[in-house]
């Protein structure tokens, strides 16, 4: 399942360096995976502890209406985003709220209020909200889906990553009047660069826009899942399933691809590195 504020969408449904990175990482944040495969983080919004889904494609982190009530927030205003297929979504928001994950604490300028149960059904009742990359603005993080963790790096651990990883083109996307934060990975094609959203919340196949399909060797007229390979740089390859659809972005990389890599993002400088993951 893919849920995001920028695109809020259901998916149509090293190692040298790895151990060294963890040894010098500032914070290793474990992801709890439930029986449906959904990854989540134990966190606190203000003083309210809960289980929050983790989704690098959400754009703007959010809390449920019940969590908003418990922290004393009366939702107000409007945050506008779009699903990947272009459908508009308007959500209310809460003002500045502190979020704590392990030893990491940050003051979020806003959190949207999102009814996860309405989107996901009864299975969402256990979640207090959903956290995305905007939690880590200005930080350096490694997404290690094969081992269910997010690693908050420091400059020392990043220096070692740079020696063992391949730098890849990254574009930071700030939608929702600059409140949202997602990251796109550049994929070179014969026509130019395609920008694919890095979406850990996509539990189905990757999504590819119909006009980009042929550039990544997919049949633009085929509506069911297709096998595909993605190679952002020579020597870096991942394979999985993809669905061609009419989107408002070039594409969306789901977990079946991302779990084959360790993806390190410098969310201050807009730079990124990838290593193949040992699964």
Image: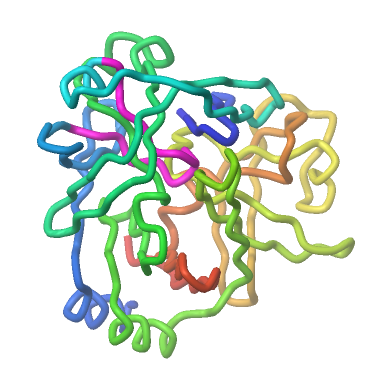
> Relative to residue 27, is residue 240 drawn left or right?
right
The colouring scheme, among rainbow, by chain, secondary structure or one colour, is rainbow
Q: Which span is picked out in magenta? A: 51-65
In the image, 104 versus 86, the foreground residue is 104
Question: Quadrant location of the C terminus?
Answer: bottom left
Q: Is residue 265 above or below residue 205?
A: below
Judged left or right of residue 68, residue 233 is right
Is 195 placed left or right of 7 in the picture? right
**Magenta-drawn stretch contains 64:** yes
Position above or below: 260 against 42? below
Q: Quadrant of residue 246?
A: top right
The N terminus, quarter of image: top left
Q: Quadrant of residue 42?
A: top left
Q: Residue furthest right?
A: 191
- The percent position of residue 174, horizontal first and vertical second, equals 58, 50
Residue at 84 percent of width and 63 percent of height: 192
- Residue 35 covered by magenta stretch: no
Asked if residue 183 is positioned above or below residue 248 in the image, the reply reads below
Instruction: Name the residue: 30% across, 21% down.
Output: 64
């Amino acid at each position: 399942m893919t849920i995001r504020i920028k695109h809020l969408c259901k998916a149509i449904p090293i190692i040298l360096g790895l151990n060294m990175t963890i040894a010098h990482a500032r914070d290793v944040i474990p992801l709890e995976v439930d029986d449906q495969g959904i990854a989540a983080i134990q966190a606190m919004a203000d003083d309210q502890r809960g289980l929050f889904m983790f989704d690098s494609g959400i754009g703007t982190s959010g809390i449920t209406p019940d969590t908003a009530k418990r922290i004393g927030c009366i939702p107000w205003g409007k945050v506008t985003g779009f699903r990947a297929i272009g459908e508009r979504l308007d959500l209310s928001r809460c003002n500045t709220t502190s979020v704590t994950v392990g030893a990491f604490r940050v003051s979020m300028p806003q959190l949207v209020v999102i009814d996860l149960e309405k989107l996901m059904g009864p299975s969402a009742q256990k979640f207090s909200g959903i956290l995305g990359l905007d939690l880590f603005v200005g930080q350096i993080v490694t997404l290690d889906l094969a081992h269910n963790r997010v690693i908050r790096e420091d400059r020392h651990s990043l220096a070692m990553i740079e020696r063992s990883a391949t730098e890849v083109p990254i574009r930071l996307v700030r939608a929702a009047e600059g409140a949202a934060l997602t990251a796109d990975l550049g994929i070179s094609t014969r026509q130019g660069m395609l920008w694919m959203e890095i979406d850990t919340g996509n539990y189905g196949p990757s999504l590819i826009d119909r006009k980009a399909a042929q550039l990544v060797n997919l049949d633009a007229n085929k509506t069911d899942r297709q096998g595909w390979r993605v190679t952002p740089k020579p020597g870096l390859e991942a394979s999985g399933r993809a669905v061609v659809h009419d989107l408002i972005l070039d594409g969306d990389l789901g977990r079946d691809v991302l779990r084959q890599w360790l993806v390190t993002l410098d969310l201050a400088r807009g730079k990124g590195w990838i290593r193949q993951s040992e699964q």
